[in-house]
Amino acid sequence: MSDAPQQEKRSPLVGGADRFSDSRRHDPPARTGRGHRHGPGSGGVTSSGILDSRILPDPEFATLWESLVFEDDLKDRLLSQAVLNFTLRGRIDRAHLPLHGIIVLAGPPGTGKTSLARGLASATAGIITGVGQFLYLEVDPHSLASAALGKSQKAVTELLGSTIAECAATHPLIVLLDEVETLAVDRSRLSMDANPIDVHRATDAVLAQLDHLADRCPNVLFVATSNFPQAIDQALLSRADVVLTVPLPGATARRQILETTLAALAREFPNVGALSASGDFERVVEACAGLDGRGIRKLVAAACAFDKNTALDPNRLRIDDLRRAAEQARAGALATKGVTK
């Protein structure tokens, strides 16, 4: 599958659950579809741990969703699970159907888990009606885990028990917990000598607050991602309604990723459009085996950099350049994994 470029522009949380903002940011432009404001702030209380907030659906996230390529029905299954969270959880007692409103996306780096989570948020909000304006929050796990000794438990409790709970009081809410193993460390792997008790207590706090939100806020969905699912505490995984593995792309997905990347380039440099029809295009697809979606897209740019004339005018890009870039990218990926050809 593809991993569309990571979105770097962040926005504050203001309005809605309307007392929180991020003092580190610059004010974003209103109504641009890129983390725009959703109401006037009233109190200016800083909400640490929130990296991004947006009203949903979001055009930027919708583009991400459309750009992602998979071999199977992973996107449809994921979207159905997210929709179910908002149509079922609030109507069936948890004693009979113990849903927590947690989806875990696991898999190798570069497979698009974060982009998938962001796109899912927009797609879900786009097809559910009658529940109010959806809000997206993205948690910064490192700001919580790096809190001073003895304070990470408090930071987690304030974020989940106050900020997110108050947002859920006014909006249906989708929350991204990126790199969730940072927040919910596998306690069975920790040494009490090597790791401060605060690390254990922070994981305890995450689990306790997720349980509390599951009981009180059926209009909240958490989407957690991890490159290292073996590092996540088993108690969190057991609470997940579904754990999906996002795999490296197979041949069909690799072909589509290359084709869509070249098509995007061809909008500015038309000659590039003919490369996907080349008789040697399948050799490029084969040479991409083992690469993640992000790496496949980047090799197109790398192919343009073999020659300064092509860098000046990508219309000069050749199929041989693509194959060479794919072979080099694959060799680099294998070397990183300690594998020799």
Image: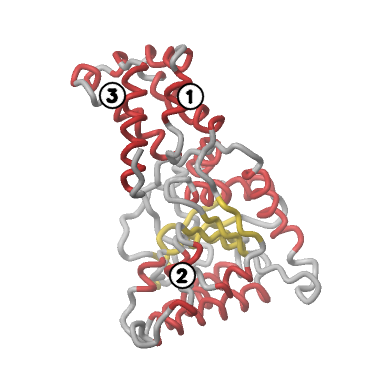
Horizontal and vertical percent for residue 305?
Answer: 24, 26
Give the Cα separation between the discs numbered 2 and 3. Answer: 48 Å
In front: 31, or 51? Answer: 51
Binning the other alpha carbons within 10 Å of mark 3 as few (below 14), some (14 to 19) or many (20 upward) gives many
Please state which amino acid type lies under the numbered disc 1: Glu
Nearer the N terminus, badge 1 or badge 2?
Answer: 2
Horizontal and vertical percent for residue 82?
Answer: 66, 54
Binning the other alpha carbons within 10 Å of mark 1 as few (below 14), some (14 to 19) or many (20 upward) gives some
Name above or below for residue 72 compared with residue 218: above
In front: 236, or 280? Answer: 280
Q: Is residue 164 found left or right of 88 in the rendered image?
A: left
Q: Secondary structure at mark 1?
A: helix
Residue, disc 2: 19
Q: Secondary structure at mark 2?
A: loop
Give the Cα separation between the discs numbered 3 and 1. Answer: 16 Å
Q: Residue at x 31, y 55 (%)?
A: 26
The answer to whether one can see residue 40 in this image is no
